[in-house]
Amino acid sequence: MKLVTYRASVAAEGRLGVIVDDLVVDVAKLGESVALPLPSTMLDFIDMGPDALAALKAALAETATSRRPGIAVPLANVRLLAPIPRPRKNIFGIGLNYVEHVAESAKSLDTSANLPDKPVVFSKPPTAVIATGEPILHNAGMTQQLDWEVELAVIIGKRATRIAKDDAMSHVFGYSVMNDVSARDNRRAGQWIFSKGQDSYAPFGPLIVTADDIPDPHDLTLWLKKNGEEKQRSNTKHLLFDIPTLISDISSGITLEPGDIIATGTPSGVGAGRDPQEWMWPGDVIECGVDGIGVLRNPVVKIGD
């Protein structure tokens, strides 16, 4: 199931929708039409747990109802927001989680050439999140090394505290795409949050695909293009630490809650690892995709002096 947060007009609030063919079906309005209580926001829907998915599937079975005017809107006529426009807490980022990226980072970013023995975890604040189509902000006074990183994002569906690997996947709600934008020259004494957490540094979306529609999240092709030229391409089967390991590791000391997001790391091909190095500049357009999920497309726009 493909879930979105959408806006049908400029003045409208963001609402939860489900994509059916070329339509966006409003989840709450659909629920009202068939006397099923369904929420109007993504976080409220995730909070409801498996019952929400079952109720939505039952409501969608009323095909004629789900396509009524006022309930369904052409996808081409809406604006997609980030699926979770304002996460409740910081996004969990994972560094150095593809072997080839470890090697290129060691050459260009002074990180260790040794493979990490545990996941490298950092965070990006909720204010970093932007939707597909929204601008990545380039402030030349802050950075001359603005870089890209395409990643598979995992959305947590069930509270997880000290979860064993064998149980971890039952805590996943769904999957999306994230660009872990990074100002390479803004790292501070080895700390990454300022480099990776500035406003607009977490393009996210364009939708969430529920876990039941992704047979194997460890066999998904991901890629990134800058101005139409491919810069990254790999597959999640090459993750150094897989999704169960990440969930188990993070939850060993930090409780994961419904709606939390884990960005699982990027493959090789980032700008810092290229020879010569490449960066994002105002006027560039960055596209990030994960097959079976969707494509993020964001322009880079100048701010500041």
Image: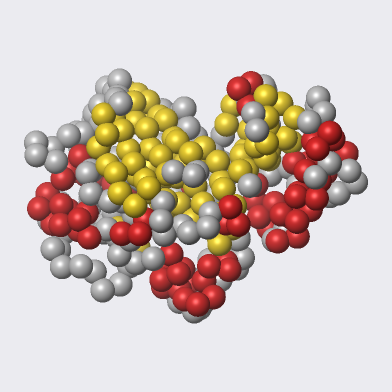
Q: Residue at x 62, y 43 (%)?
A: 3
Nearer the observer, 229 or 21 = 21
Left/right placement of residue 215 relative to residue 278 reads right
Q: How is the image coloured?
A: secondary structure
User: Residue 54, image x and y in percent?
Assistant: 75, 56
Left/right placement of residue 13 relative to residue 263 reads right
Q: Residue at x 30, y 65 (%)?
A: 240
Q: Is residue 211 above or below residue 177?
A: below
Q: Is residue 251 visible?
A: yes
Q: Is residue 142 visible?
A: no
Q: Is residue 75 above or below residue 104?
A: above
Left/right placement of residue 268 relative to residue 157 reads left
User: Residue 229, image x and y in percent?
Assistant: 26, 29
Q: Residue at x 31, y 59 (%)?
A: 238
Q: Is residue 155 above or below residue 270?
A: below
User: Residue 38, image x and y in percent?
Assistant: 79, 48
User: Residue 97, image x and y in percent?
Assistant: 29, 60
Q: Is residue 5 above or below residue 35?
A: above
**Residue 223 placement: quadrant:** top left
Q: Residue at x 37, y 25 (%)?
A: 299
**Residue 303 placement: quadrant:** top left
Total residue callouts: 0
Position of the C terminus, as image quadrant, is top left
